[in-house]
Image: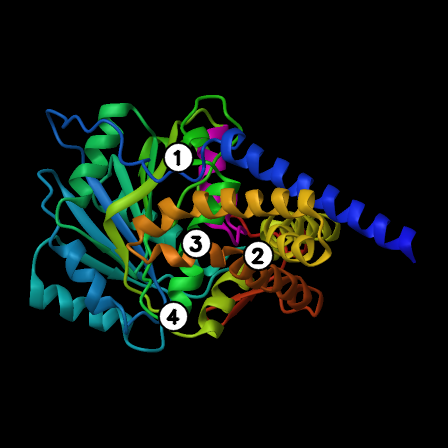
Amino acid sequence: MVWGIIAWMSALAWTAVSSLAAWLWLLLGQGFFWRTDIRLPDRREPGSWPSVALVVPARDEAAVLPLSLPSLLAQDYPGEARIFLVDDSSSDGTGDLASALADRHGGLPLTVTTPGEPPAGWTGKLWAVRHGVTEARDVMRPEYLLLTDADISHAPDSLRELVAAAHGSGYDLVSQMARLRAVSVWERLIVPAFVYFFAQLYPFRRIAVPGSRTAAAAGGCVLLRDEAAARAQVPDSIRHAVIDDVALARAVKSTGGRVWLGLADKVDSVRPYPRLGDLWRMVSRSAYAQLRHQPLLLLGTVAGLLLVYVAPPAGLVAGLLLGDQAAAWAAGLAWLVMTATYVPMLRYYRLPLALAPLLPGTAVLYLLMTVDSAVQHYRGRGAAWKGRTYARPDRAEPAPDQ
């Protein structure tokens, strides 16, 4: 009995120390992912403003379109710019509403087009993007493409600053992580952590480093040089990607393009996620795809989340109850480092810093969402979104020649 307790306490101490070591490495060795000071790079305005096509894939977006589309119509851009809204087989009158909003607000020219149902091997969003890009090239031969979602609102000078940043710094892809809505209790608890975890996986500083293997973008706001899109053959080359923004950035970077991703000050998501179920579906639809549908990666992720996020508070409580001061100190320091790294993200979202110590609980929710994503996959439901379900890429039918 005594030896069992001693062995248990020894395991507790080693777990706490391992968790602390992991957090010290994350603090200093993971591209300073927790910092939120990555904003648009050098913005030197070009002497002649390039033409830009704003491509907006939209499926059943009538609820949010009045909050987002007027902001695109009102863009203060000195060069030629046109909006191509692709109504992806909506059932709520999205296309008609978009035309009505353009008539009411004026501003940039708007073209509403419909691609029809996607062929086998394509996700709906990427098929809509392909249709919008093709339409734009037929109409205006754009130098840049702004790929933005129907739930994203832009400040009047957003497009101007994006183009100036791409021109001034020589990037082929400039993407901003839109500030997501964080109003309801569940949004406040889960949304900042979503961005925090994303930055932990894809440290923004490393994305911009030439030759770095880290590549990612935020699909809500991507300014892409049309020449780079053609060179990377996107969206055709990533037509089956569920996590299309990361796949897009990888395709551009793998063909020699320069990629930049940072946080936005003037780009906001207007889509509400008031209930836990709304956020759960948003995360779980692609969580297992992020792990490439690999059971071993899932097991490793679960073990890693437990060690990094759950072990510190659990180890602190257990260490105090058992009188294991070494375990309590190590676990407490790990929890403190974790909390400190989360504070900048809460400040960015203008939320109470008292939420920072609750990050372990939020991590458990994400762990459960990831497991649920895998369960749904093995039940044959795949990644589901907007009424469509997508098979894993190696099981999708090959797309016909386009």
Residue beneath disc 2? 287
Q: Amino acid at mark 4?
A: Val
Instruction: Please report contact status of discs 2 and 3: CB closer than 8 Å, yes or no.
Output: no
For marks 2 and 3, give the CA distance. Answer: 23 Å
Q: Nearer the viewer, mark 1 or mark 2?
A: 2
Left or right: 393, with 232 as reference point: right
Find residue 356 and name its label: 3
Q: Nearer the viewer, mark 1 or mark 3?
A: 3
Q: Is residue 311 above or below residue 216?
A: below
**Residue 394 magenta-drawn?**
no
| Residue 24 position within the rendered picture, expressed as x and y whole percent measured from the top left | 56, 34
The front one of 246 and 252 is 246
For marks 1 and 3, give the CA distance. Answer: 43 Å
Residue beneath disc 4? 185
Q: Residue 353 lies in what quarter of the image?
A: bottom left
For marks 1 and 4, give the CA distance. Answer: 43 Å
Q: Amino acid at mark 3?
A: Ala
Residues packed near mark 4 inside 10 Å, few (<14), some (14 to 19) or many (20 plus): few
